[in-house]
Amino acid sequence: MRLLVTGGMGFIGSRFLHYWLEKHPQDAVVNFDLLTYAGNSHNVADIRNVPGYLEIRGSITDAALIERVMTEERIDTVVHFAAESHVDRSILDPHRFIQTNVLGTQTLLEAAKKHKVSKFVHISTDEVYGTLGEQGSFNEQTPLAPNSPYSASKAGSDLFVRSYYETYGLPAVITRCSNNYGPYQFPEKLIPTIITRALQDEAVPIYGDGLQIRDWLFVDDHCTAIDLVIHKGRSGEVYNIGGSSERTNLYMVKRILQELGKSEQLIRFVPDRLGHDRRYAVDSSKIRNELGWRPTHTLDEGLLMTLDWYRRNESWWRAILDGTYQLEECAHAKEGDGL
């Protein structure tokens, strides 16, 4: 295969690149990323010399650049991670999320249609379904009911992917995952926020009463699911990917503090986020039954691995917290005008 992976400098995208290059060394992979604040070239530093790997810096809204990459690199498979993904930022600046998540996805779809790719895998989120009560779980037939500008923009991109399958026959598949966690996750997300603040003995903020429930999925298990979707997923279908590990945010904070030997006195309850969804839970029976996927990491195992990684990689997260990571350009990436 010749894959175009968008957003490969981010958390899930970079973990997927590591997974793919190890599992499928015969394939060629283009890592296409704009290197916004959430992208970090250090995430892929150890794979730059792997045969078949290439970095290109650019925006998914740049139709001309996407066209050149698709043509010159002879792309036949697109795995689309690139997105603005932080809910708090979407509340402050919805326009950026529409530009990247909706218009950027449509730009990729148009290029994929023109070049007749064999598979277009769109990585989405369970947040497009909205919120749940105390019972039940999201399945692939659950109506979309997004409650934040972020989830609305992802729902919009999902609908464009669906439309390109229905209208043009593009072999596209949508995956909707639950909350990912693991090494290299940007510190603004819940679990790395808890870890990095606790390691510095700083206050750990938690929205509202902390009883919001999320289903936690270890990032490496997500990567194996995407692999199966690329090879076996049916075009036009949606596959939910969940970790079957529902926990409240407060539980996660207390558990991490306990593992780090820190006091719960660090917890600070803060005013709740606007439009904060109360509960997510994902029914993954479709991908389990059709494609044979199973998560291989329990929440306990994944959390311990994640905590150990952040302990051992203090320089990585401190560079993000003080902003110095952004001073280092991705030296091996081709600039768009250098292709």
Image (cartoon, helix red, strand yellow):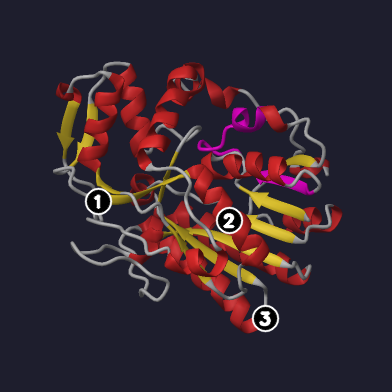
**Residue at point 61% right, 73% down?**
234
Which label belongs to residue 213?
1
Q: Nearer the viewer, residue 288 or 163?
A: 288
Identify residue for label 2.
226
Asked which secondary structure carries label 3, the reply is: helix
**Residue at point 49% right, 68% down?**
289
Which label belongs to residue 197?
none
Lower sequence index among marks 2 and 1: 1
Q: Position of residue 323 (x, y in %)?
A: 48, 23
Lower sequence index among marks 3 and 1: 3
Q: Are marks 2 and 3 in contact (CB under 8 Å)?
A: no
Q: Amino acid at mark 2?
A: Ile
Cα–Cα span, label 2 and label 3 = 23 Å
Q: Residues within 10 Å of mark 3 (few under 14, many from 20)?
A: few
Lower sequence index among marks 2 and 3: 3
**Residue at point 33% right, 38% down?**
190
Q: Which residues are magenta?
A: 27-45
Which label belongs to residue 168?
3
